[in-house]
Amino acid sequence: MECVLIWQCRHGWGRRIVSSKSSGRADWARLREFLTARPENEDAVSLSWDELSRIVGGIPDSAARHYPQWWHGDRSHVRAWQAAGYIATQIQPGQSVTFRRTGTSDPAHRHAARRRENALSPDGGVHMLKGLISSETLLLISCSKTKRTGGEADPWESAPWSSELLAARRQNRAIANVDERRLMPAWRRYDGGFYATAGDGLREAVAREAPLLILSGGYGLLHPQEPIGEYNKIMRLSDWPAGLLEALLVGEARRRNVSSVVAFAARSSDYAKLVRRTSWKEAGVNAFLVNIEGAGKGASRKVPRRLGQAFTCFWHGHQADRYPEGTTVELLG
């Protein structure tokens, strides 16, 4: 027997009651935001006609007069609740309507809502990481622009990746200016702010062979000990076959038999976008993105360093108050 949780809206929205026949133009973006902010364990939201009216600022008469056509099709108000990942069901014009979750919400709205929720949390959402065992979690980190030079000239055995990724790497060699005359383990090649401040935490994770991948502009995905050359390329998702990196991330989570993923990346970067658009939930994996908000002037230098500090805090299981300023955590779908 299927159990469906339905949330009945009975909360006050201020003292002023807005009639469902308000002459003002309804703002359906308010419903989108309302639905986007609902907890993920709520499968449906049931609203009375008056409650829905108070949210959007008045339901037009056409919602009842042109039922059921008004509630379906490519219409601006329909797109509003679809963007939040819902469809309208059990519609009783003038009485009530139920919005049922479909699980296909617009990622931009979903993650914006989660960032707002984290901003209201005293610890920026770090509490969501509590209980995770760092050595049993797939850790995702970004490469860095700064790299150590040199390395070994002798050929090393490469990590076993799919032929699709190897072919994509070859396609990117020229634009990434890859020079593999000398090789060095990936985690040692990178020398930016993240790697400088992650320090002992990163070294210990590599030494213990913890599940760890590096998101790389020149190589796509890397195991930390995988030998790489020098290159100069930031991650651009358009350079890689659609869906390839996402599938490989999910495959690695399954190969390492982990139930959780924690990524560390600047929130607006393509590294973060890659992690966000990976279908973790469908794979049965709980995924979290750690980023830094409000770094202000000098963010390009501060953010990687603070992310490295956050990595070490997570690895060592520190309390939220030990994490660097501006740390926030997004729960990913």
Image (cartoon, rainbow, N blue to C red):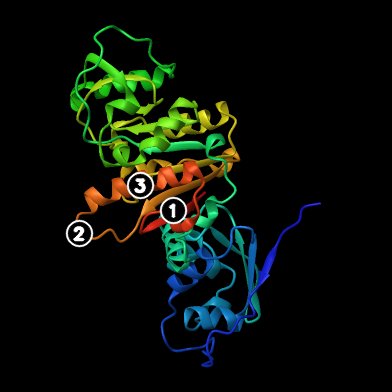
Compare residues 281 and 151 and report the one nearer the observer: 151
Return the residue at label 3. Answer: 307
Residue 99, percent across and down? 60, 66
Front label number (1 vs 2): 2
Compare residues 303 and 43 and report the one nearer the observer: 303
Q: Earlier in the sequence, mark 3 or mark 1?
A: 1
Q: The disc labelled 3 sits on which kind of residue?
A: Leu
How crowded pointer 1 is (Cα within 10 Å; few <14, some 14-19, many 20+) is rated as: some
Residue at 43% in and 70% down: 29
Return the residue at label 1. Answer: 107
Secondary structure beneath disc 3? Answer: helix
| Up/down of 51 relative to 215, above or below | below
Does residue 45 appear to the left or right of 319 in the view shown?
A: right
Contact? badges 3 and 2 (CB < 8 Å):
no
Count of numbered badges drawn on the protein: 3
Q: The disc labelled 2 sits on which kind of residue?
A: Lys
Does residue 212 appear to the left or right of 96 in the view shown?
A: left
Which residue of the protein is positioned furthest toward the top in this rendering? Answer: 154
Q: The disc labelled 1 sits on which kind of residue?
A: Pro
Compare residues 149 and 293 and report the one nearer the observer: 149
**Cα distance in 3D space between marks 3 and 2:** 16 Å
Return the residue at label 2. Answer: 297
Q: Please tell me in which quadrant of the rendered image residue 46 appears.
A: bottom right
**Cα distance in 3D space between marks 3 and 1:** 23 Å
Contact? badges 3 and 1 (CB < 8 Å):
no
Residue at 36% in and 40% down: 198
Secondary structure beneath disc 2? Answer: loop
Residue 241, percent across and down? 36, 30
